[in-house]
């Protein structure tokens, strides 16, 4: 009975071998590493270079970023990855609702300029949504 229990426990266990630290490298492992390196290079090419200055991070730029996402989801702006116009109305509605939630949660904590920006962006996106949903 004890042997049966031990056999069941052994069947449930597993061993993980990390080949990165083994002294002997296999060709398969080396080719996989090359593929990973190539895909990392592709990702790096799509990101801004370190020399380019990044935009200032503030509330307005955050709202504009969300509104740009909503416009892409509404099919008003070309998707930067697929280079096509794609409509996803449920996702656009969710993004617009997210901006609305931010407006409510930050009420009384925004500068007059930030309040105007979020109100304008919400108004514009809601109008665009209604026009697109028709």
Image: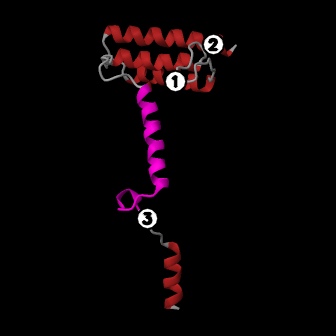
Element at badge 3?
loop
First in sequence: mark 1 or mark 3? 3
What is the x, y in percent for residue 101? 45, 24
First in sequence: mark 3 or mark 2? 3
Name the foreground residue: 105 vs 41.
41
- Quarter location, residue 90: top right
Q: Residue at x 34, y 8 (%)?
A: 113
Mark 2, residues whose alpha carbon is within 10 Å: few (<14), some, or many (≥20)?
few
What is the x, y in percent for residue 97? 51, 23
What is the x, y in percent for residue 61? 37, 16
**Residue bearing the label numbered 2:** 130
Element at badge 1?
helix
Q: Residue at x 53, y 13 (%)?
A: 125
Evaluate if marks 1 and 3 touch, with contact meaning CB atoms under 8 Å apart.
Answer: no
From this view, report whether residue 115 is shown above or below residue 47: above
Mark 1, residues whose alpha carbon is within 10 Å: few (<14), some, or many (≥20)?
many
What segment is highlighted magenta in the picture? 18-45
């Amino acid at each position: 009975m004890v042997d049966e229990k031990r056999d069941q426990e052994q069947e449930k266990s597993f061993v993980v071998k990390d080949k990165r630290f083994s002294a002997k490298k296999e060709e398969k492992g080396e080719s996989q590493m090359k593929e990973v390196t190539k895909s990392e290079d592709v990702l790096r090419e799509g990101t801004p270079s370190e020399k380019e200055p990044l935009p200032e991070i503030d509330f307005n730029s955050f709202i504009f970023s969300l509104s740009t996402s909503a416009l892409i989801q509404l099919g008003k702006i070309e998707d930067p990855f697929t280079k096509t116009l794609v409509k996803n109305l449920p996702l656009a509605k969710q993004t617009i609702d997210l901006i609305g939630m931010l407006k409510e949660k930050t009420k009384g904590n925004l500068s007059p300029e930030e309040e105007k920006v979020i109100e304008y962006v919400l108004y514009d996106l809601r109008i665009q949504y209604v026009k697109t949903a028709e």
